[in-house]
Image (cartoon, rainbow, N blue to C red):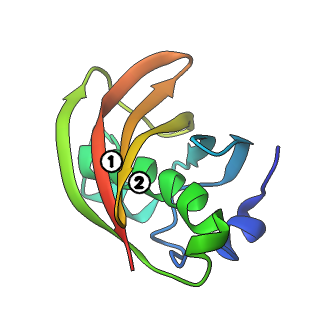
């Protein structure tokens, strides 16, 4: 592990109950890999769905974005700045994230244009892809 949850909180602004990255396992100048453990008692599971709890797809995307933000906000030129989504493209959901599962999060930044960063992102559970797509973020 490179960064634990407390160290992640020193980099990105999200906090519980809206923090979806528990640790960072790998990071270089283009790739960041982290994980999130979906607890049985996560507040949003009570309503999604009663009788069959599953992590909402939009929160899987949010976890992927937060993972990406750790890398962006770790860059010296971005320290102290903020990151916002500008687009979410080509997303496919290929599986579900259920309580007590660990989601492996990966972002690979493919290009930068001014203050816009483009990344391919993948979420896996037990090494199987559950979601993948592309995100664009702006740093300001």
Residue 65: where, in percent of width, then height?
Answer: 41, 54
Question: Which residue is drawn at the image coordinates 42% and 31% (left, top)?
Answer: 122
Q: Residue furthest front?
A: 114
Q: Quadrant of residue 130?
A: top left
Residue 13 % position (x, y): 53, 79
User: Can you give x and y, in whole percent of width and height, for residue 92 in the image?
Assistant: 21, 27
Query: Which of the numbered marks, if any, corresponds to residue 65?
Result: 2
The residue under the point 59% across, 55% down is 71
Query: Which quadrant of the figure has residue 111?
Result: top left
**Mark 1 residue crowding within 10 angstroms, few (<14) / some (14–19) / many (20+):** many
Residue contact between numbered discs 1 and 2, judged by CB atoms under 8 Å: yes
Q: Residue furthest top?
A: 128
Q: Is residue 84 left or right of residue 68?
A: left
Between 69 and 53, the residue placed more toward the observer is 69
Marks 1 and 2 sit apart, C-alpha to C-alpha, by 6 Å
Vertical comparison of 66 with 95: above or below? below
Q: Is residue 118 above or below residue 44?
A: above
For the N terminus, the image quarter is: top right
Q: Quadrant of the C terminus?
A: bottom left
**Residue reaching furthest bottom?**
80
Depth check, front residue: 99 or 21: 21
Res 50 visible: no
Q: Residue 29, percent across and down?
A: 64, 46
Badge nearest the viewer, 1 or 2: 2
Q: Which numbered dot is residue 61? A: 1
> Which disc, if any, is residue 104?
none
Q: Which element carries disc 2, helix, strand or loop?
A: helix
Horizontal side, residue 18 vs residue 56: left or right: right
């Amino acid at each position: 592990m490179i960064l634990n949850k407390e160290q992640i909180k020193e980099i990105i602004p999200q906090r519980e109950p809206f923090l979806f990255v528990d640790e960072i396992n790998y990071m270089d100048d283009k790739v960041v890999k982290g994980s999130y453990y979906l607890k049985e008692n996560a507040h949003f599971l009570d309503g999604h769905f009663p009788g069959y709890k599953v992590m909402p797809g939009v929160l899987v995307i949010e976890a992927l974005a937060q993972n990406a933000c750790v890398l962006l906000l770790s860059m010296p030129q971005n320290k102290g700045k903020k990151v916002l989504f500008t687009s979410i493209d080509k997303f496919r959901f290929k599986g579900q994230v259920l309580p007590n599962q660990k989601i492996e999060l990966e972002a690979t930044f493919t290009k930068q244009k001014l203050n816009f960063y483009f990344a391919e992102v993948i979420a896996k559970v037990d090494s199987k892809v559950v979601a993948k797509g592309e995100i664009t973020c702006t740093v300001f």
